[in-house]
């Protein structure tokens, strides 16, 4: 059983790890004038092509109003486009443009490399232990129902 000091150290490490993880992309995202929310929008739109804006709102746990401006800006930058959903013509489906796909490949490569190297250095090359911890943290989040679509 972890004692209070160990747990506090792990909480701090979790914070620093997230900062390192997100800071590594800042050079690329700032070059493209992208916010962290816009990066998350692109990430999920890439992982689940054709997802609806309603699904994205559920995954990101934001309001329709909170999505409107960043999504509009991504469309203006030519990174994402909105089409009529094939399943339900009343819904809008999200897709990355070729420019958006290339940008996300660069960003994903950077983050995948970080994870892969950290797993190897920690002696868990597949990241199974870390994935189990993440799954426990995220198990009740609405977006977890979409993970199997990746």
Image: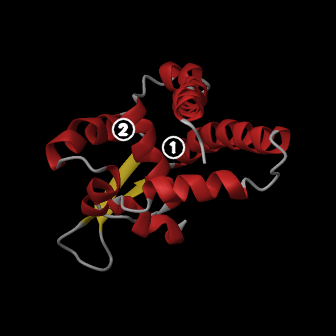
Q: Is residue 17 visible?
A: yes
Q: Evaluate if marks 2 and 1 touch, with contact meaning CB atoms under 8 Å apart.
A: yes
Q: Characterize the local packing of mark 1: few (<14), some (14-19) or many (20 or more) Cα atoms within 10 angstroms.
A: many
Q: Which mark is residue 75?
A: none
Camera-nearest residue between 115 and 17: 17
- Residue that appears at 39% across and 37% down: 38
Q: Is residue 79 visible?
A: no
Q: Characterize the local packing of mark 2: few (<14), some (14-19) or many (20 or more) Cα atoms within 10 angstroms.
A: many
Camera-nearest residue between 18 and 99: 18
Quarter of the image where one finds residue 139: bottom left
Camera-nearest residue between 78 and 149: 149
Residue 106 placement, left or right of 74 = right
- Residue that appears at 61% across and 37% down: 107
Q: Earlier in the sequence, mark 2 or mark 1?
A: 2
Residue 20 placement, left or right of 81 = right
From what the image shows, is residue 109 above or below residue 132? above
Residue 90 placement, left or right of 8 = left
Q: Position of residue 57 (x, y in %)?
A: 27, 54
Q: Which mark is residue 100?
A: 1
Q: Position of residue 126 (x, y in %)?
A: 78, 56
Q: How far apart are the alpha carbons under marks 2 and 1?
A: 9 Å
Q: Quadrant of the C terminus?
A: bottom right
> Which type of secondary structure does the marked residue at label 2 adopt?
helix
> Could you tell me how many numbered marks the image carries?
2
- Residue that appears at 63% across and 43% down: 108
**Extreme-bottom residue of the structure:** 87
> Which type of secondary structure does the marked residue at label 1 adopt?
helix
From what the image shows, is residue 143 above or below residue 72? below
Q: Position of residue 121 (x, y in %)?
A: 84, 38
Residue underneath mark 2: 74
Q: Position of residue 75 (x, y in %)?
A: 34, 41
């Amino acid at each position: 059983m972890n004692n209070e000091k160990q747990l506090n150290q792990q909480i701090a490490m979790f914070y620093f790890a997230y900062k390192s993880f997100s800071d590594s992309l800042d050079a690329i995202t700032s070059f493209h004038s992208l916010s962290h929310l816009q990066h998350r929008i692109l990430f999920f739109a890439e992982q689940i092509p054709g997802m609806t804006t309603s699904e994205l709102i559920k995954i990101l746990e934001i309001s329709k109003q909170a999505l409107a401006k960043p999504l509009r800006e991504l469309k203006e930058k030519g990174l994402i486009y909105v089409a009529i959903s094939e399943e339900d013509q009343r819904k809008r489906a999200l897709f990355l443009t070729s420019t958006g796909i290339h940008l996300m490949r660069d960003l994903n490569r950077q983050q995948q490399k970080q994870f892969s190297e950290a797993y190897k250095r920690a002696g868990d090359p597949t990241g199974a232990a870390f994935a189990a911890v993440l799954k426990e943290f995220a198990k009740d989040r609405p977006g977890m129902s979409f993970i199997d679509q990746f």
